[in-house]
Amino acid sequence: MSGELFYPDSRPWTRWWWFNIELKDEVIRSQLDWLEANGFGGVELAFVYPLPGQKRGPEWLSREWSDKVALTKRYCDNIGIGCDFTFGTLWPFGGSLVEERDSSQTFEGASRQRLGRSWELPLEGRILNHLDKQVLRRYSEKMGAALAKALQGSRSALFCDSWEVETEGLWTAGFGEAFHDRFGYDVREYMPRLDEHPDVRYDYRKLVAEYVLEGFYRPFTEVSHRLNAFTRVQCHGAPTDLLSAYAAVDVPESEAILFDPEYSRIPASAAALSGKAVVSAEAFTCLYGWNPYPGPGPHQGEERVADMKLLADALFANGVNHIFWHGMPYQAQAQAGSKANRFYATVHVGPDSGFAAEIPRLNQYMERVCGQMKQGRPFSSVALYLPHEDQWMRGELPSELQKPSAKYHWEMHYLRPPRELAGYQPLWISTPFLRQARFEDGLLRVGATELSLLYVDCEWLDADALNEILRLAKAGLPVCLKQKPSQPGRNKTDGYAQQVAELASLSNVASELGKASSRPPLLSGVDVPDFWCRTVDEGLRIFFSHPESRVLTYPMRYGQADAAGVAERQVRIEWDGRVRDLGLEFGRSQSLLLEVSRSAAARFVDISHEPGPAAAIDR
Protein backbone atom coordinates (compact mmCIF):
# COMPACT_ATOMS: atom_id res chain seq x y z
CA MET A 1 0.00 0.00 0.00
CA SER A 2 3.03 2.24 -0.20
CA GLY A 3 2.18 5.44 -2.07
CA GLU A 4 -1.60 5.02 -1.72
CA LEU A 5 -3.26 8.32 -0.93
CA PHE A 6 -5.21 7.68 2.23
CA TYR A 7 -7.36 10.68 3.23
CA PRO A 8 -7.59 12.12 -0.30
CA ASP A 9 -10.21 14.52 1.12
CA SER A 10 -8.04 17.07 2.92
CA ARG A 11 -10.69 18.44 5.26
CA PRO A 12 -9.44 18.21 8.85
CA TRP A 13 -10.80 15.42 11.01
CA THR A 14 -11.38 15.39 14.74
CA ARG A 15 -10.94 12.89 17.51
CA TRP A 16 -14.40 12.18 18.97
CA TRP A 17 -14.30 11.29 22.64
CA TRP A 18 -16.89 8.63 23.26
CA PHE A 19 -17.32 8.55 27.01
CA ASN A 20 -18.89 5.47 28.55
CA ILE A 21 -22.30 7.07 28.81
CA GLU A 22 -25.66 6.39 27.19
CA LEU A 23 -25.28 6.54 23.39
CA LYS A 24 -28.32 7.88 21.55
CA ASP A 25 -28.74 7.51 17.80
CA GLU A 26 -30.19 10.98 17.35
CA VAL A 27 -27.29 12.56 19.27
CA ILE A 28 -24.74 10.67 17.17
CA ARG A 29 -26.37 11.88 13.96
CA SER A 30 -26.73 15.44 15.22
CA GLN A 31 -23.06 15.77 16.15
CA LEU A 32 -21.95 14.27 12.86
CA ASP A 33 -24.21 16.67 10.96
CA TRP A 34 -22.62 19.58 12.81
CA LEU A 35 -19.13 18.37 11.94
CA GLU A 36 -19.94 17.97 8.25
CA ALA A 37 -21.54 21.43 8.15
CA ASN A 38 -18.47 23.00 9.71
CA GLY A 39 -15.84 21.66 7.36
CA PHE A 40 -14.69 18.45 9.04
CA GLY A 41 -13.84 15.48 6.87
CA GLY A 42 -14.25 12.73 9.43
CA VAL A 43 -14.03 11.48 13.00
CA GLU A 44 -11.79 9.16 14.95
CA LEU A 45 -13.75 7.38 17.65
CA ALA A 46 -11.83 7.21 20.93
CA PHE A 47 -13.43 5.11 23.65
CA VAL A 48 -12.81 6.56 27.12
CA TYR A 49 -13.97 6.68 30.73
CA PRO A 50 -17.47 6.98 32.26
CA LEU A 51 -18.65 10.38 33.48
CA PRO A 52 -19.94 10.84 37.03
CA GLY A 53 -23.68 11.21 37.33
CA GLN A 54 -24.45 9.95 33.82
CA LYS A 55 -25.95 6.63 32.81
CA ARG A 56 -23.33 4.19 31.61
CA GLY A 57 -23.18 3.11 27.99
CA PRO A 58 -23.10 -0.41 26.58
CA GLU A 59 -20.72 -3.00 27.92
CA TRP A 60 -17.27 -2.89 26.31
CA LEU A 61 -17.23 -4.82 23.00
CA SER A 62 -20.78 -6.08 23.55
CA ARG A 63 -23.22 -6.52 20.66
CA GLU A 64 -24.94 -3.27 21.64
CA TRP A 65 -21.56 -1.46 21.60
CA SER A 66 -20.73 -2.90 18.17
CA ASP A 67 -24.13 -1.87 16.81
CA LYS A 68 -23.66 1.74 17.94
CA VAL A 69 -20.22 1.91 16.37
CA ALA A 70 -21.50 0.38 13.11
CA LEU A 71 -24.45 2.79 13.01
CA THR A 72 -22.01 5.67 13.36
CA LYS A 73 -19.87 4.39 10.49
CA ARG A 74 -22.91 3.95 8.22
CA TYR A 75 -24.12 7.48 8.94
CA CYS A 76 -20.67 8.90 8.24
CA ASP A 77 -20.75 7.14 4.87
CA ASN A 78 -24.22 8.56 4.20
CA ILE A 79 -23.19 12.19 4.77
CA GLY A 80 -19.79 11.90 3.08
CA ILE A 81 -17.33 11.97 5.94
CA GLY A 82 -14.88 9.32 7.17
CA CYS A 83 -14.76 7.31 10.37
CA ASP A 84 -11.67 5.80 12.05
CA PHE A 85 -11.45 3.78 15.25
CA THR A 86 -8.98 3.60 18.10
CA PHE A 87 -8.15 -0.10 18.28
CA GLY A 88 -8.99 -0.39 21.95
CA THR A 89 -9.92 1.74 24.91
CA LEU A 90 -7.31 4.35 25.74
CA TRP A 91 -3.58 4.14 25.18
CA PRO A 92 -1.81 1.75 24.97
CA PHE A 93 -3.77 -1.33 23.91
CA GLY A 94 -5.17 -3.34 26.79
CA GLY A 95 -8.28 -3.98 28.83
CA SER A 96 -10.30 -6.90 30.12
CA LEU A 97 -9.71 -8.89 26.93
CA VAL A 98 -5.99 -9.14 27.79
CA GLU A 99 -5.34 -12.37 29.67
CA GLU A 100 -2.55 -12.62 32.21
CA ARG A 101 -0.35 -14.59 29.80
CA ASP A 102 -0.65 -11.75 27.26
CA SER A 103 0.04 -8.85 29.62
CA SER A 104 3.04 -6.53 29.46
CA GLN A 105 6.13 -7.96 31.14
CA THR A 106 9.17 -6.56 32.89
CA PHE A 107 12.33 -8.36 33.93
CA GLU A 108 10.87 -8.68 37.43
CA GLY A 109 7.60 -10.22 36.21
CA ALA A 110 4.18 -9.05 35.10
CA SER A 111 3.98 -5.28 34.70
CA ARG A 112 2.00 -3.46 37.36
CA GLN A 113 0.83 -0.90 34.82
CA ARG A 114 -2.92 -0.81 34.25
CA LEU A 115 -5.24 1.12 31.99
CA GLY A 116 -6.61 4.18 33.72
CA ARG A 117 -9.69 6.15 32.71
CA SER A 118 -10.76 3.48 30.22
CA TRP A 119 -14.28 2.59 29.08
CA GLU A 120 -14.29 -0.26 31.59
CA LEU A 121 -13.74 1.71 34.81
CA PRO A 122 -13.74 0.85 37.65
CA LEU A 123 -12.05 -2.20 36.10
CA GLU A 124 -8.46 -1.31 35.19
CA GLY A 125 -7.42 -3.84 32.58
CA ARG A 126 -3.96 -5.17 31.87
CA ILE A 127 -1.62 -3.63 29.31
CA LEU A 128 -0.96 -5.73 26.21
CA ASN A 129 2.50 -7.23 25.72
CA HIS A 130 3.68 -5.04 22.82
CA LEU A 131 6.76 -7.20 22.14
CA ASP A 132 4.98 -10.34 20.94
CA LYS A 133 3.12 -10.46 17.62
CA GLN A 134 1.19 -13.57 18.67
CA VAL A 135 -0.21 -11.64 21.62
CA LEU A 136 -1.26 -8.85 19.25
CA ARG A 137 -2.87 -11.41 16.96
CA ARG A 138 -5.01 -12.80 19.81
CA TYR A 139 -5.99 -9.28 20.88
CA SER A 140 -6.86 -8.28 17.32
CA GLU A 141 -9.17 -11.27 16.87
CA LYS A 142 -11.36 -9.99 19.70
CA MET A 143 -11.19 -6.31 18.76
CA GLY A 144 -11.64 -7.13 15.08
CA ALA A 145 -14.75 -9.18 15.74
CA ALA A 146 -16.32 -6.33 17.72
CA LEU A 147 -15.53 -3.85 14.92
CA ALA A 148 -16.39 -6.17 12.02
CA LYS A 149 -19.68 -4.48 11.04
CA ALA A 150 -18.16 -1.02 11.44
CA LEU A 151 -15.30 -1.92 9.08
CA GLN A 152 -17.75 -2.51 6.23
CA GLY A 153 -18.42 0.23 3.72
CA SER A 154 -15.77 2.89 3.16
CA ARG A 155 -12.27 2.07 4.35
CA SER A 156 -11.36 3.11 7.88
CA ALA A 157 -8.11 3.42 9.73
CA LEU A 158 -7.38 1.57 12.93
CA PHE A 159 -5.59 4.08 15.11
CA CYS A 160 -2.84 3.63 17.69
CA ASP A 161 -1.91 6.59 19.88
CA SER A 162 1.56 7.41 21.15
CA TRP A 163 3.54 4.73 22.98
CA GLU A 164 2.56 4.82 26.63
CA VAL A 165 3.78 1.42 27.76
CA GLU A 166 6.09 1.68 30.76
CA THR A 167 9.54 0.80 29.45
CA GLU A 168 11.67 0.29 32.56
CA GLY A 169 12.94 -3.30 32.40
CA LEU A 170 10.65 -4.17 29.47
CA TRP A 171 10.81 -7.92 28.84
CA THR A 172 9.09 -10.84 27.16
CA ALA A 173 9.41 -14.62 26.93
CA GLY A 174 12.60 -15.64 25.17
CA PHE A 175 14.18 -12.19 25.32
CA GLY A 176 17.06 -13.27 27.53
CA GLU A 177 17.95 -16.18 25.26
CA ALA A 178 17.69 -13.99 22.15
CA PHE A 179 19.95 -11.42 23.78
CA HIS A 180 22.58 -14.04 24.54
CA ASP A 181 22.44 -15.34 20.98
CA ARG A 182 22.90 -11.83 19.61
CA PHE A 183 25.51 -10.38 21.95
CA GLY A 184 27.18 -13.42 23.48
CA TYR A 185 26.59 -12.62 27.14
CA ASP A 186 23.79 -12.81 29.70
CA VAL A 187 21.98 -9.49 30.16
CA ARG A 188 20.00 -10.81 33.13
CA GLU A 189 22.87 -10.30 35.56
CA TYR A 190 22.92 -6.62 34.61
CA MET A 191 19.17 -5.92 34.60
CA PRO A 192 18.83 -4.93 38.28
CA ARG A 193 21.44 -2.15 37.76
CA LEU A 194 21.18 -1.54 34.04
CA ASP A 195 21.70 2.22 34.27
CA GLU A 196 25.11 1.64 35.81
CA HIS A 197 26.27 -0.02 32.57
CA PRO A 198 25.51 2.29 29.60
CA ASP A 199 27.12 -0.06 27.04
CA VAL A 200 25.01 -3.00 28.22
CA ARG A 201 21.97 -0.75 28.36
CA TYR A 202 22.65 0.18 24.74
CA ASP A 203 22.66 -3.48 23.67
CA TYR A 204 19.45 -4.04 25.65
CA ARG A 205 17.74 -1.05 24.02
CA LYS A 206 18.91 -2.10 20.56
CA LEU A 207 17.24 -5.50 20.94
CA VAL A 208 14.10 -4.02 22.55
CA ALA A 209 13.86 -1.71 19.53
CA GLU A 210 13.75 -4.71 17.21
CA TYR A 211 11.16 -6.48 19.34
CA VAL A 212 8.90 -3.41 19.32
CA LEU A 213 9.13 -3.12 15.55
CA GLU A 214 8.68 -6.81 14.76
CA GLY A 215 6.31 -7.61 17.63
CA PHE A 216 3.97 -4.65 17.32
CA TYR A 217 4.21 -2.00 14.61
CA ARG A 218 4.71 -4.24 11.57
CA PRO A 219 2.18 -6.86 12.73
CA PHE A 220 -0.35 -4.14 13.56
CA THR A 221 -0.36 -3.05 9.92
CA GLU A 222 -0.67 -6.66 8.76
CA VAL A 223 -3.58 -7.23 11.16
CA SER A 224 -5.35 -4.09 10.01
CA HIS A 225 -5.09 -5.03 6.35
CA ARG A 226 -6.63 -8.41 7.10
CA LEU A 227 -9.53 -6.56 8.71
CA ASN A 228 -10.03 -4.45 5.55
CA ALA A 229 -8.62 -1.39 7.30
CA PHE A 230 -5.40 0.59 7.21
CA THR A 231 -3.22 1.95 10.01
CA ARG A 232 -2.67 5.44 11.29
CA VAL A 233 -0.16 5.40 14.12
CA GLN A 234 1.74 7.70 16.45
CA CYS A 235 5.05 5.94 17.04
CA HIS A 236 6.55 8.69 19.15
CA GLY A 237 7.64 7.67 22.60
CA ALA A 238 8.39 4.12 21.47
CA PRO A 239 11.81 2.64 22.31
CA THR A 240 12.57 1.70 18.72
CA ASP A 241 14.01 2.97 15.45
CA LEU A 242 11.36 5.64 14.97
CA LEU A 243 11.90 5.95 11.23
CA SER A 244 11.40 2.22 10.69
CA ALA A 245 8.34 2.22 12.94
CA TYR A 246 6.69 5.14 11.15
CA ALA A 247 7.55 3.56 7.80
CA ALA A 248 5.86 0.31 8.89
CA VAL A 249 2.42 1.92 9.12
CA ASP A 250 0.18 3.30 6.39
CA VAL A 251 -0.21 6.84 7.77
CA PRO A 252 2.46 8.07 10.20
CA GLU A 253 1.04 10.56 12.66
CA SER A 254 2.79 13.27 14.65
CA GLU A 255 1.47 15.33 17.56
CA ALA A 256 1.62 18.93 18.74
CA ILE A 257 2.18 20.68 20.98
CA LEU A 258 3.09 18.14 23.63
CA PHE A 259 5.69 17.39 20.95
CA ASP A 260 7.21 20.54 19.45
CA PRO A 261 6.52 21.06 15.73
CA GLU A 262 10.08 20.15 14.65
CA TYR A 263 9.50 16.60 15.85
CA SER A 264 7.15 16.11 12.87
CA ARG A 265 10.16 15.98 10.57
CA ILE A 266 10.80 12.44 11.86
CA PRO A 267 7.48 10.91 10.69
CA ALA A 268 7.61 13.12 7.59
CA SER A 269 11.07 11.75 6.77
CA ALA A 270 9.88 8.18 7.25
CA ALA A 271 6.98 8.87 4.91
CA ALA A 272 9.28 10.32 2.27
CA LEU A 273 11.74 7.43 2.44
CA SER A 274 9.03 4.77 2.34
CA GLY A 275 6.75 6.37 -0.24
CA LYS A 276 3.90 7.34 2.08
CA ALA A 277 1.80 10.22 0.73
CA VAL A 278 0.12 11.41 3.95
CA VAL A 279 1.60 12.58 7.25
CA SER A 280 -1.07 13.42 9.79
CA ALA A 281 -0.86 15.20 13.13
CA GLU A 282 -2.90 15.20 16.31
CA ALA A 283 -3.08 18.95 16.64
CA PHE A 284 -3.75 21.48 19.41
CA THR A 285 -3.28 18.96 22.25
CA CYS A 286 -2.68 20.69 25.59
CA LEU A 287 -2.14 23.92 23.69
CA TYR A 288 -1.26 26.10 26.68
CA GLY A 289 -0.17 23.36 29.06
CA TRP A 290 -1.40 20.22 30.75
CA ASN A 291 -3.11 19.66 34.05
CA PRO A 292 -3.76 16.16 35.41
CA TYR A 293 -7.22 14.65 35.29
CA PRO A 294 -9.83 16.02 35.74
CA GLY A 295 -8.28 19.24 34.43
CA PRO A 296 -9.19 21.57 32.89
CA GLY A 297 -6.04 22.66 31.12
CA PRO A 298 -4.96 26.31 31.07
CA HIS A 299 -7.33 28.51 29.03
CA GLN A 300 -9.48 25.54 28.07
CA GLY A 301 -12.54 26.95 26.36
CA GLU A 302 -10.76 30.25 25.67
CA GLU A 303 -8.37 29.06 22.93
CA ARG A 304 -7.23 31.59 20.36
CA VAL A 305 -7.76 30.60 16.73
CA ALA A 306 -4.72 32.62 15.67
CA ASP A 307 -2.58 30.53 18.05
CA MET A 308 -3.96 27.33 16.56
CA LYS A 309 -3.33 28.54 13.03
CA LEU A 310 0.27 29.42 13.90
CA LEU A 311 0.78 25.93 15.30
CA ALA A 312 -0.82 24.29 12.25
CA ASP A 313 1.49 26.31 10.00
CA ALA A 314 4.51 25.16 11.99
CA LEU A 315 3.36 21.56 11.42
CA PHE A 316 2.95 22.15 7.69
CA ALA A 317 6.50 23.53 7.56
CA ASN A 318 7.74 20.25 9.04
CA GLY A 319 6.02 17.92 6.59
CA VAL A 320 2.49 17.42 8.00
CA ASN A 321 -0.32 17.46 5.44
CA HIS A 322 -3.40 16.26 7.31
CA ILE A 323 -4.83 17.60 10.57
CA PHE A 324 -6.73 15.80 13.32
CA TRP A 325 -8.27 18.15 15.85
CA HIS A 326 -7.95 17.02 19.46
CA GLY A 327 -10.92 16.98 19.91
CA MET A 328 -14.71 16.81 20.27
CA PRO A 329 -16.51 15.19 23.23
CA TYR A 330 -19.61 13.07 22.77
CA GLN A 331 -22.47 15.02 24.29
CA ALA A 332 -25.41 13.68 26.25
CA GLN A 333 -27.91 15.62 24.17
CA ALA A 334 -28.26 16.72 20.58
CA GLN A 335 -27.76 20.41 21.31
CA ALA A 336 -24.88 21.06 23.70
CA GLY A 337 -25.75 23.37 26.54
CA SER A 338 -23.99 25.03 29.45
CA LYS A 339 -23.34 21.65 31.04
CA ALA A 340 -21.70 20.14 27.98
CA ASN A 341 -19.24 17.32 28.46
CA ARG A 342 -15.55 18.18 28.36
CA PHE A 343 -12.42 16.13 27.84
CA TYR A 344 -9.85 17.31 30.32
CA ALA A 345 -6.71 17.66 28.16
CA THR A 346 -7.74 19.10 24.83
CA VAL A 347 -8.95 22.03 22.80
CA HIS A 348 -12.74 21.82 23.01
CA VAL A 349 -14.48 21.32 19.64
CA GLY A 350 -18.22 21.65 19.28
CA PRO A 351 -21.05 24.13 18.74
CA ASP A 352 -20.39 25.45 22.25
CA SER A 353 -16.67 26.08 21.59
CA GLY A 354 -15.50 29.55 22.44
CA PHE A 355 -14.32 29.83 18.84
CA ALA A 356 -17.15 27.85 17.17
CA ALA A 357 -17.95 30.63 14.69
CA GLU A 358 -14.35 30.58 13.42
CA ILE A 359 -14.03 26.82 12.93
CA PRO A 360 -15.40 26.65 9.35
CA ARG A 361 -12.93 29.14 7.90
CA LEU A 362 -9.97 27.70 9.79
CA ASN A 363 -10.92 24.26 8.49
CA GLN A 364 -11.18 25.63 4.97
CA TYR A 365 -7.70 27.10 5.32
CA MET A 366 -6.17 23.87 6.58
CA GLU A 367 -7.98 21.88 3.89
CA ARG A 368 -6.58 24.17 1.20
CA VAL A 369 -2.99 23.94 2.43
CA CYS A 370 -3.10 20.17 3.05
CA GLY A 371 -4.59 19.56 -0.37
CA GLN A 372 -1.71 21.44 -1.97
CA MET A 373 0.95 19.70 0.15
CA LYS A 374 -0.28 16.16 -0.57
CA GLN A 375 0.59 16.50 -4.23
CA GLY A 376 3.90 15.33 -5.63
CA ARG A 377 6.59 14.08 -3.27
CA PRO A 378 8.91 15.71 -0.70
CA PHE A 379 12.02 17.46 -1.97
CA SER A 380 15.35 17.18 -0.22
CA SER A 381 19.01 17.05 -1.10
CA VAL A 382 20.48 16.02 2.27
CA ALA A 383 20.05 12.84 4.27
CA LEU A 384 20.64 13.58 7.97
CA TYR A 385 21.59 10.60 10.11
CA LEU A 386 19.17 10.16 13.01
CA PRO A 387 21.43 9.60 16.04
CA HIS A 388 19.58 6.78 17.78
CA GLU A 389 22.89 5.65 19.23
CA ASP A 390 23.50 8.94 21.06
CA GLN A 391 20.00 8.84 22.52
CA TRP A 392 20.09 5.14 23.48
CA MET A 393 23.42 5.64 25.27
CA ARG A 394 21.85 8.27 27.52
CA GLY A 395 19.38 7.92 30.37
CA GLU A 396 16.63 10.21 31.57
CA LEU A 397 16.37 13.83 30.53
CA PRO A 398 17.41 16.39 33.14
CA SER A 399 14.43 17.25 35.32
CA GLU A 400 14.16 20.75 33.86
CA LEU A 401 13.67 19.26 30.37
CA GLN A 402 11.09 16.66 31.33
CA LYS A 403 7.44 17.32 30.50
CA PRO A 404 4.24 15.23 30.37
CA SER A 405 5.34 13.61 27.11
CA ALA A 406 9.12 13.54 27.64
CA LYS A 407 11.18 11.58 30.13
CA TYR A 408 14.04 9.98 28.16
CA HIS A 409 16.57 11.20 25.63
CA TRP A 410 15.55 8.43 23.21
CA GLU A 411 12.11 10.02 22.83
CA MET A 412 13.95 12.70 20.80
CA HIS A 413 11.91 15.68 21.91
CA TYR A 414 14.84 18.04 21.62
CA LEU A 415 16.50 16.75 18.47
CA ARG A 416 16.78 19.41 15.77
CA PRO A 417 18.51 19.51 12.37
CA PRO A 418 21.63 21.74 12.42
CA ARG A 419 20.86 25.28 11.31
CA GLU A 420 23.46 25.02 8.54
CA LEU A 421 21.16 22.49 6.86
CA ALA A 422 18.00 24.60 7.07
CA GLY A 423 18.00 25.56 3.39
CA TYR A 424 18.36 21.94 2.24
CA GLN A 425 15.17 20.62 3.86
CA PRO A 426 17.04 17.61 5.27
CA LEU A 427 15.35 14.27 5.75
CA TRP A 428 16.29 12.09 8.71
CA ILE A 429 17.66 8.67 7.79
CA SER A 430 18.65 5.56 9.76
CA THR A 431 20.54 2.33 9.15
CA PRO A 432 17.71 0.24 7.62
CA PHE A 433 17.21 2.88 4.92
CA LEU A 434 20.95 3.19 4.32
CA ARG A 435 21.04 -0.58 3.91
CA GLN A 436 18.53 -0.44 1.06
CA ALA A 437 20.06 2.71 -0.48
CA ARG A 438 22.29 2.82 -3.52
CA PHE A 439 24.50 5.56 -4.93
CA GLU A 440 24.28 5.94 -8.68
CA ASP A 441 24.39 8.76 -11.20
CA GLY A 442 25.62 11.08 -8.47
CA LEU A 443 22.60 10.55 -6.23
CA LEU A 444 21.74 8.56 -3.12
CA ARG A 445 18.52 6.73 -3.98
CA VAL A 446 16.17 5.40 -1.31
CA GLY A 447 13.03 4.26 -3.07
CA ALA A 448 11.84 7.28 -5.05
CA THR A 449 13.77 9.72 -2.85
CA GLU A 450 16.94 11.19 -4.34
CA LEU A 451 19.57 12.91 -2.18
CA SER A 452 23.01 14.27 -2.86
CA LEU A 453 24.71 14.29 0.56
CA LEU A 454 24.77 12.32 3.82
CA TYR A 455 25.32 14.38 6.98
CA VAL A 456 26.48 12.51 10.10
CA ASP A 457 26.99 14.21 13.44
CA CYS A 458 26.94 11.82 16.37
CA GLU A 459 29.15 10.84 19.25
CA TRP A 460 28.26 7.16 18.93
CA LEU A 461 27.75 5.17 15.72
CA ASP A 462 26.76 1.53 15.55
CA ALA A 463 29.05 -0.78 13.58
CA ASP A 464 26.15 -1.69 11.28
CA ALA A 465 25.62 1.97 10.43
CA LEU A 466 29.33 2.56 9.91
CA ASN A 467 29.49 -0.35 7.46
CA GLU A 468 26.66 1.11 5.35
CA ILE A 469 28.04 4.64 5.42
CA LEU A 470 31.47 3.39 4.41
CA ARG A 471 29.95 1.32 1.58
CA LEU A 472 28.09 4.31 0.17
CA ALA A 473 31.02 6.67 0.62
CA LYS A 474 33.29 4.27 -1.26
CA ALA A 475 30.72 4.31 -4.07
CA GLY A 476 31.14 8.08 -4.24
CA LEU A 477 28.48 9.51 -1.94
CA PRO A 478 29.57 12.85 -0.45
CA VAL A 479 29.53 12.59 3.35
CA CYS A 480 29.81 15.37 5.90
CA LEU A 481 31.27 13.65 8.97
CA LYS A 482 31.18 16.30 11.69
CA GLN A 483 33.07 14.24 14.27
CA LYS A 484 34.73 10.85 14.53
CA PRO A 485 32.31 8.58 16.41
CA SER A 486 32.90 5.78 18.89
CA GLN A 487 31.24 2.38 18.91
CA PRO A 488 28.43 1.89 21.43
CA GLY A 489 27.63 -1.41 23.12
CA ARG A 490 29.59 -3.84 25.26
CA ASN A 491 31.16 -5.81 22.42
CA LYS A 492 33.62 -3.82 20.36
CA THR A 493 34.22 -4.70 16.72
CA ASP A 494 37.77 -5.39 15.59
CA GLY A 495 38.81 -2.78 13.10
CA TYR A 496 36.11 -0.25 14.01
CA ALA A 497 38.61 2.58 14.52
CA GLN A 498 40.32 1.68 11.25
CA GLN A 499 36.98 1.86 9.42
CA VAL A 500 36.31 5.30 10.88
CA ALA A 501 39.78 6.41 9.79
CA GLU A 502 39.21 4.96 6.31
CA LEU A 503 35.91 6.80 6.01
CA ALA A 504 37.40 10.10 7.11
CA SER A 505 40.29 9.71 4.63
CA LEU A 506 38.09 9.51 1.53
CA SER A 507 38.23 12.56 -0.74
CA ASN A 508 34.42 12.85 -0.78
CA VAL A 509 34.23 12.91 3.05
CA ALA A 510 34.83 16.09 5.04
CA SER A 511 33.99 17.56 8.42
CA GLU A 512 32.79 20.85 6.90
CA LEU A 513 29.60 21.00 4.90
CA GLY A 514 31.06 23.19 2.17
CA LYS A 515 33.99 20.84 1.64
CA ALA A 516 31.85 17.70 1.55
CA SER A 517 29.67 18.99 -1.27
CA SER A 518 29.69 22.01 -3.55
CA ARG A 519 25.94 21.85 -4.20
CA PRO A 520 24.14 24.91 -2.85
CA PRO A 521 21.05 24.67 -0.67
CA LEU A 522 17.66 25.01 -2.27
CA LEU A 523 17.06 28.13 -0.18
CA SER A 524 19.53 30.61 1.25
CA GLY A 525 19.28 34.00 2.90
CA VAL A 526 19.34 35.65 6.28
CA ASP A 527 17.07 33.93 8.81
CA VAL A 528 15.26 31.80 6.23
CA PRO A 529 11.82 30.90 7.63
CA ASP A 530 10.88 27.27 8.18
CA PHE A 531 9.52 25.66 5.03
CA TRP A 532 8.51 22.39 3.44
CA CYS A 533 9.00 21.73 -0.25
CA ARG A 534 7.47 19.16 -2.59
CA THR A 535 8.21 18.43 -6.22
CA VAL A 536 4.94 18.63 -8.16
CA ASP A 537 4.83 17.83 -11.87
CA GLU A 538 7.79 19.74 -13.31
CA GLY A 539 8.12 22.27 -10.51
CA LEU A 540 8.34 22.93 -6.79
CA ARG A 541 5.70 23.85 -4.24
CA ILE A 542 7.11 25.52 -1.12
CA PHE A 543 5.15 26.30 2.04
CA PHE A 544 6.73 28.97 4.27
CA SER A 545 5.41 29.31 7.80
CA HIS A 546 5.46 32.71 9.46
CA PRO A 547 8.91 33.30 11.04
CA GLU A 548 7.30 33.44 14.49
CA SER A 549 6.30 29.77 14.19
CA ARG A 550 9.94 28.71 14.62
CA VAL A 551 9.91 29.58 18.33
CA LEU A 552 6.88 27.47 19.19
CA THR A 553 7.44 25.05 22.01
CA TYR A 554 5.38 23.42 24.73
CA PRO A 555 3.43 25.11 26.20
CA MET A 556 2.40 27.91 23.86
CA ARG A 557 1.91 31.32 25.38
CA TYR A 558 -1.69 32.42 25.39
CA GLY A 559 -2.00 34.86 22.51
CA GLN A 560 1.45 33.96 21.16
CA ALA A 561 0.27 34.60 17.60
CA ASP A 562 0.00 38.29 18.48
CA ALA A 563 3.78 38.42 18.03
CA ALA A 564 3.47 37.15 14.46
CA GLY A 565 3.42 40.59 12.91
CA VAL A 566 4.34 41.78 9.43
CA ALA A 567 7.72 40.36 8.41
CA GLU A 568 9.94 40.32 5.33
CA ARG A 569 12.67 37.96 4.21
CA GLN A 570 14.90 37.87 1.15
CA VAL A 571 15.64 34.38 -0.12
CA ARG A 572 17.58 32.87 -2.99
CA ILE A 573 16.22 29.74 -4.67
CA GLU A 574 18.77 27.65 -6.56
CA TRP A 575 17.09 24.87 -8.49
CA ASP A 576 17.16 23.37 -11.95
CA GLY A 577 20.27 25.33 -12.88
CA ARG A 578 18.63 28.71 -12.20
CA VAL A 579 18.96 31.28 -9.47
CA ARG A 580 15.86 33.17 -8.35
CA ASP A 581 15.97 36.01 -5.81
CA LEU A 582 12.63 36.61 -4.14
CA GLY A 583 11.16 38.73 -1.39
CA LEU A 584 8.85 37.02 1.10
CA GLU A 585 6.29 39.37 2.63
CA PHE A 586 4.38 37.90 5.55
CA GLY A 587 1.21 39.55 6.76
CA ARG A 588 0.17 39.31 10.38
CA SER A 589 -0.11 35.62 11.29
CA GLN A 590 0.16 34.72 7.61
CA SER A 591 2.13 32.02 5.86
CA LEU A 592 3.02 31.76 2.19
CA LEU A 593 2.76 29.16 -0.57
CA LEU A 594 5.10 29.51 -3.53
CA GLU A 595 5.07 27.66 -6.83
CA VAL A 596 8.30 27.47 -8.83
CA SER A 597 8.32 26.07 -12.36
CA ARG A 598 11.00 25.52 -14.94
CA SER A 599 9.27 27.51 -17.63
CA ALA A 600 7.58 30.40 -15.83
CA ALA A 601 8.20 32.93 -13.12
CA ALA A 602 7.67 31.89 -9.51
CA ARG A 603 4.20 32.76 -8.24
CA PHE A 604 2.52 32.92 -4.85
CA VAL A 605 -0.71 30.99 -4.29
CA ASP A 606 -3.26 32.83 -2.17
CA ILE A 607 -3.64 31.00 1.14
CA SER A 608 -4.34 34.05 3.26
CA HIS A 609 -6.52 33.52 6.29
CA GLU A 610 -7.53 36.15 8.82
CA PRO A 611 -8.99 34.57 11.96
CA GLY A 612 -12.53 35.75 12.40
CA PRO A 613 -16.13 34.50 12.65
CA ALA A 614 -17.96 32.88 9.77
CA ALA A 615 -21.16 30.99 9.21
CA ALA A 616 -21.24 27.23 8.74
CA ILE A 617 -20.11 25.94 5.37
CA ASP A 618 -22.81 25.30 2.80
CA ARG A 619 -21.85 22.09 1.00
Image (cartoon, grey):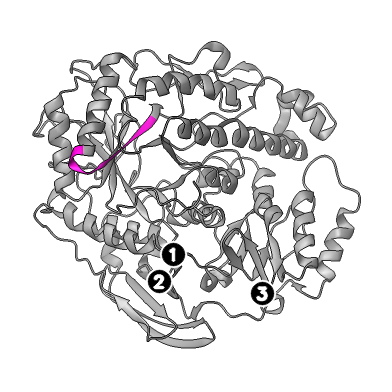
The residue lying toward the viewer, choosing from 157 and 369, is 157
Mark 2 or mark 3, whichever is nearer to me? 2
Q: Amino acid at mark 2?
A: Arg
- Residue 378 position in % (x across, y down): 48, 64
- Residue at 68% x, 54% y: name it: 436
Determine whether, in the image, residue 617 is placed left or right of residue 565: left
Residue 79 is covered by the magenta coloring: yes
Identify the residue position indicated by label 3 in the image.
Answer: 513
| Label located before the other in sequence (3 or 1) | 1
Q: Which residues are the magenta region?
A: 78-86
All told, the count of numbered labels is: 3
Q: Quadrant of residue 115?
A: top left
Q: Is the residue under label 1 in contact with that under label 2 (CB below 8 Å)? A: yes
* Disc ID at residue 376: 1
Q: Amino acid at mark 3?
A: Leu
Mark 2 or mark 1, whichever is nearer to me? 1
The residue lying toward the viewer, choosing from 311 and 84, is 84
**Mark 2 burial class by Cα count in 10 Å: few <14, some 14-19, many 20+:** many
Identify the residue position indicated by label 2 in the image.
Answer: 541
